[in-house]
Amino acid sequence: MPKAEPPRTIFRQVVDTLGAAVLRGDYSDGPLPVETELAASLGVGRNLLREAIKVLASKGLVAVGPKIGTRALPRSEWNLLDPDVLLWLSETEGAMTHSFDLVEFRLIVEPRAAHLAALRATEAEREHITASYKAYEECLTRPELVVDRDLVFHQAIHNASHNALLASIGWRLGTMMRRQVLTTTDYPGAFERGLPLHKELAEAIAARDAAWAEVVAFRLVVMPYEDLATRLDVPMAQRLDGENSETTPVQSRRPAQRRPKRAALSHTH
């Protein structure tokens, strides 16, 4: 069964309420109500409100100063990799739009991360990626575990790239990726369709085949990308590789060639 969410403290509720209000544009990149008025409207004391404002300031949502008071900042200042900001965005503007933004970002980044993982992963990391795939495969009979195990699989690849920024970004995007996976596996057959590509990606990394790992990672992420682009009516001309989603960045840089042999993973149930 899914883990029950712990009850939110009053402080957490205030942070969430104010954060979502800023992201909705309730304050239109302008001043928030004066402290006494805002505290009264939220039913909390001024000290608690000040601490909540400090949290929002640390996320780039507001600026605080003696002459400006507390002022909402424009979107360009927001820390869009902050898990709370990502969560508030998905709640205020819709999970579909932000899932599309995420999967488009993944389509740009993950094929190259897989390429690096195939080149740089240690033996222990390759074994962990293989084990993560096998755990993911078990979701055929335990669908409630799909999201958690998919996140573990992809984070293992980011970590194996041995690029600190990729590993950090992968972890920070976990909250938003969780919502994206839920959104793009919400119809019958979606999980089964992507499972063979997860296996093939693990095999390519285990075999140190960087070029093929990049191709497979692209094909894996392009499935939810095209799904969400279609649901959101994104014009083909505005999509990444929209004219031919079967053409990957690797394929466009080299002539067609036979797929190399790789050591197969055992199929478990």
Image: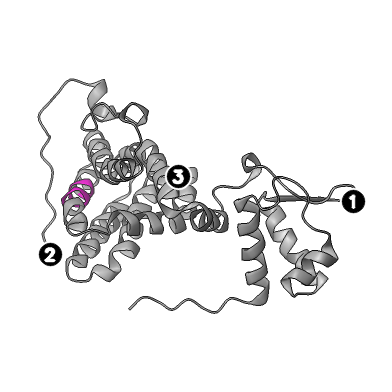
Whichever of labels 2 and 3 marks the residue nearer the N terminus, that label is: 3
Q: CA distance from mark 1 to mark 3?
A: 38 Å
50 sits left or right of 114 in the view: right
Q: Amino acid at mark 3?
A: Leu
Instruction: Please state the horizontal and vertical placement of residue 135, each as a whole percent of the image.
Output: 24, 65
Tell me the tag on residue 219. none
Q: Amino acid at mark 1?
A: Pro
Q: Amino acid at mark 2?
A: Thr
Whichever of labels 2 and 1 marks the residue nearer the N terminus, that label is: 1
Q: CA distance from mark 2 to mark 3?
A: 30 Å
> Closer to the camera, 131 or 185?
185
68 sits left or right of 55 in the view: right
Q: Looking at the magenta stretch, what is its main secondary structure?
A: helix
| Image quarter of residue 20 | bottom right
Q: Nearer the viewer, mark 2 or mark 1?
A: 1
192 sits left or right of 11 in the view: left
Instruction: Please state the horizontal and vertical placement of residue 202, each as a whole percent of the image.
Output: 23, 50
The residue identified by callout 3 is 166
Bounds of the magenta span? 196-202
| Image quarter of residue 249 | top left
Q: CA distance from mark 2 to mark 1?
A: 63 Å
Q: Secondary structure at mark 3?
A: helix
Residue 242 is a magenta residue: no
Residue displayed at 39% across by 48% down: 158
| Image quarter of residue 236 | top left
The residue identified by callout 1 is 66
Colour scheme in use: one colour
Query: Is the residue under label 3 in contact with that under label 1 (CB below 8 Å)?
Result: no
Please state, as top left, top right, bottom left or bottom right, where the C terminus lies in the image: bottom left
The residue identified by callout 2 is 268
